[in-house]
Image: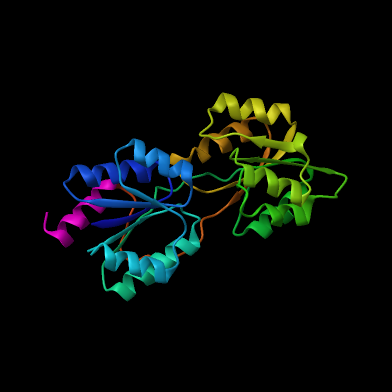
Amino acid sequence: MILMLCGTSDARELAIRIQQQGHNVLTSVVTESAAQSLTEAGLPVRTGRLTVEAMVQLIREKNTPVLVDASHPFAEEAHANAMEAAKQAGIPYIRYERTGLAYDDHELLHVVSSYDEAALKAKELKGSVMLTTGSKTLQIFTKHLLGDPDIRLVARMLPRLDNMEKCGELGVEQRNIIAMQGPFSREMNEALYKHYATMVMVTKESGKTGAVDEKIQSALELGIHVVLISRPEAEFGTVFDHFDGVLDELKSILGR
């Protein structure tokens, strides 16, 4: 049974394709909402984060011949754990990395390499700052931006109880929380930018499938500064940005 780490909508589609090729697949996700989406697609799924040790144990229990890592481009810990677990278990590791964005130079586009750098750039630009980077790194932005009288910090994130609690603990006011699940249309992005008088939008370079290009394009057209956090650099070894590459590699490994 192939073990597949899933963290994006296109990972779900890839898992379906692998299953359609006649392979048994066990998908692994972190959240219950992601698990529900995979279950509805008829895919076996387990939920919760995996340490290296837990992943190795699961690989051995399921007699896994290969590990496919299709987790989110910014899931650095998951990538590292998966590569190490595959190494310890002595099985091949395949990385599916969704296609990145190709963006032109623009006077309002600021590409940075870390969350701290993004927060400092937003602090420099000032105004109404909309975060679309999720809750995991929210504390980095609240540390740098909250308390500045020239900055309004607006956080857009999934409508989960733990996210709302975290916002409260970090001092983000309720009126500055957008609790919604995407992907968002260009019209919705524009409406939110206008409603919150956004002057700076912070996002991650998650790829076209993650609708990041829609956020960026609509922001730039409205004259909004965009702070774009580039993807973490990693040496994956065997990596593909298209489904057929993964499927062909599986056929080479498994013989079908």
Outermost residue to the front: 61
Give the quadrant of residue 201. Answer: top right
The x and y percentages for residue 88 are 33, 75
Residue 226: tell me if it is visible.
no
Q: Horizontal placement of 143 versus 88: left or right?
A: right
The x and y percentages for residue 161 are 63, 42
Residue 189: tell me if it is visible.
yes
In this picture, which residue range is highlighted in magenta? 243-256
245 in magenta = yes
Residue found 39% across the figure and 48% down from its top: 98
The x and y percentages for residue 181 are 55, 35
Where, quadrant-wise, is the N terminus in this rendering?
bottom left
Residue found 70% across the figure and 57% down from its top: 140
Q: Horizontal placement of 53 versus 178: left or right?
A: left
Residue found 52% across the figure and 49% down from its top: 205
Q: How many marks?
A: 0
* Render colour scheme: rainbow
Outermost residue to the right: 149
Where, quadrant-wise, is the C terminus in this rendering?
bottom left
Q: Is residue 238 above or below residue 8?
A: below
Q: Is residue 197 above or below residue 56?
A: above
102 in magenta = no
Residue found 44% across the figure and 48% down from its top: 100
